Image (tube, rainbow, N blue to C red):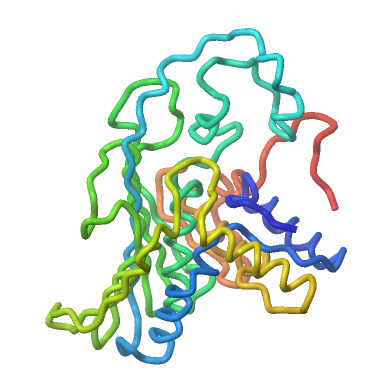
Amino acid sequence: VYVEKPCSHNPAEGAMLVAAQKKYNRLVQMGNQQRSSPHTIEIIGKIRSGLIGRPYFGRSWYSNTRKSIGVGKVVPVPQELDWDLWQGPAPRRPYKDNVHPYNWHWFWNWGTGETLNNGTHEVDVCRWALGVDYPNRVSASGGRYHFKDDWEFYDTLTAGFEYDDRMITWEGLSCSGKLTYGRDRGALIIGTKGSVLIDRNGYEVFGTDDKPIDKFVVGKNTTSADLMSIDSMTDDHFRNLIAGIRDGEKLHSPINEGNISVTTLQLANIAWKVQRSLRFNTQDGTIIEDPEATRWWSREYEKGWELKI
């Protein structure tokens, strides 16, 4: 089974996916396809082997120039769309002309915002490089600043994930298009002896004096900006899953591992929603001593569509 991220609307659903995988003993791979990128696997291995000393900070980001979605109008459902099936377990809403096929990401009833749309990928690389699981504390701040429309999430967000002796940050700029280190997305891993800049097309290694030490460029397009995700990384990720099914090859992102990244980013959404920093159980990511925030751990379901294993 191949599960596209964010793979769940809330942490409770992610936990259910993991439980279902165990119950039915199926191979389930999450769609964070950079886990199957050869150059990323190589450089993460070098980082974990001491290339830049002890890695302790991961900075990740994503930027885009998304346009305003305007104010939607209730219109007849397109003939080719099964609106009831499309909404799945979400409480039913009337069909509006600015939701389908992509803008649902920006509505709380169906989507998870840019944090889980693209932030999952970059934070996952940081978590992989630093060798961390669930954070001790998460904070997030931002808002819908660029346009005033139906968009319910933020278009600008900064999130911080604190571990015992390490930290990850994520910056999402959905509408500004401002590049970081000349890249629209990526991760910078900082260690005691240097740093590594990683994106989907290569990596650069620097000393503590910021002088370049090594550089690798793939030399071909490893990813695409379209909505189909037809690229070499995705091909490699599916290839790994197929090899797992046929030959017992170890999956690069089994659902129990991928779900940690997804849940971590969902915790950032919850922190943004309640407008405060949150503390967590590092064994399972559950929220500590905050009933209001815990209410967002699961979701309201349309009657008859409640998820269960």
Residue 36 sits above or below residue 191 on the image = above
User: In screen coordinates, is 6 left or right of 37?
Assistant: right
Q: Is residue 43 left or right of residue 10?
A: left
Q: Which of 66 and 149 is in front in this view?
A: 66
Residue 238, percent across and down?
65, 62
Direction from residue 306 to residue 279 in the image, left or right: left
Whether residue 271 is visible to the viewer of this picture, yes or no, is: no
Q: Nearer the viewer, residue 284 or 183?
A: 183
Residue at the spot x=46%, y=29% of the render?
A: 152
Picture quarter containing residue 215? bottom left
- Name the residue furthest front: 220
Q: From this viewpoint, is residue 4 visible?
A: yes
Q: In which quarter of the image is the N terminus?
A: bottom right
Residue 129 locus on image (x, y percent): 43, 76
Front-most of residues 145 and 102:
102
Residue at point 66%, 15% (across, down): 78
